[in-house]
Amino acid sequence: MAHMPFARLFFARFFFARLFFARMLAVLLSLAVLVPAPAAFAVNASRPDRPAANEPRGAVDEGRDAVERKDWPGAVAHLRRATATAPDDADAWNLLGFALRKGGDFPAALAAYDRALTLAPEHKGALEYLGEAYLQLGRPGDARAVLRRLEAACGSGACEELDDLRRAFAAHGVAQR
C-alpha cells in the first residue's frame, strides 16, 4: 500500500474503518436482543392492567403481590422504590412498614408507620399495624395509645382494622384498658 496514491490509501482506510465499526455495531445490537431488559424498564406483561414496576403504583402493586407471597425482601424492595418515587403515598409507607415488620426489621417498620401517620394521621391500616408492632415488641402501653387513636379514627361505625387490633390484643394476652 505504500505506493498507492494518497486518495486511494485514505479511501481504503476509511472504508475498512467503517466496515469495522459497522460490524461492531451489529454485534452489539445482536447482544442487546439476547440480554433481558432490566426490571426498571420491563413492562408488566403478566398484569397488563397494572402500571410498569418503575411507576409508583406499579411498584406498590408489585410490593402487594410480594406480600401476598410472603416474599418480605421482595416486597420491601418494591415498596422502597414506590416510596422513593412517591414519598407522599401513605398507603405505600404503611405497606412498607408491614413488610418490614413481617421481615423482622422493627425499627424500620416503626419509622415507616410513623411516616404513613405523618402523611395521614387517621390512616386506619397504619394505626392497626403500628399497634400490632407494639404488641409484638412487648410495649402494651404504646399499643393501647394506638388503640385509642384507632377507636377515634373509626368512630362509631364498624371498622375492620379496629376489630383486627382488638384480636391482636387478645392473642397477646394483653388487656385493652
Image: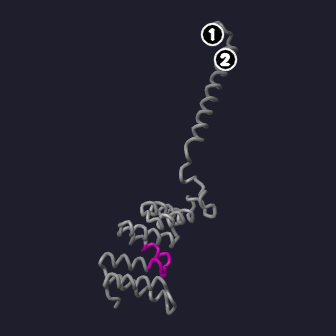
Name above or below for residue 122 compared with residue 77: below
Q: Position of residue 68 (x, y in %)?
A: 48, 67
Residue 69 sits inside the magenta stretch: no
- Region in magenta: 113-127
Residue marked by disc 1? 1
- Please state which of residues 117 and 37 is positioned toward the viewer in this rendering: 37
Above or below residue 126? Residue 151 is below
Q: Are marks 1 and 2 in contact (CB under 8 Å)?
A: yes
Classify residue 23 as left or right of residue 135: right
**Residue name at image x 60 percent, y 41 percent:** 33
Please, which residue is most extreme toward the left here?
A: 138
Q: Would you name the residue on which mark 2 appears?
A: 12
Q: Is residue 71 above or below residue 143?
A: above
Mark number, residue 122? none
Residue at 34 percent across and 79 percent down: it is 135
Residue type highlighted by circle 2: Ala
Q: Please, what is the three-letter code of the amino acid marked with disc 1?
A: Met
Residue 83 place in picture, x, y as percent: 50, 65
Q: Quadrant of residue 5?
A: top right
* Label 1 Cα neighbours within 10 Å, binned few <14 / some 14-19 / many ≥20: few
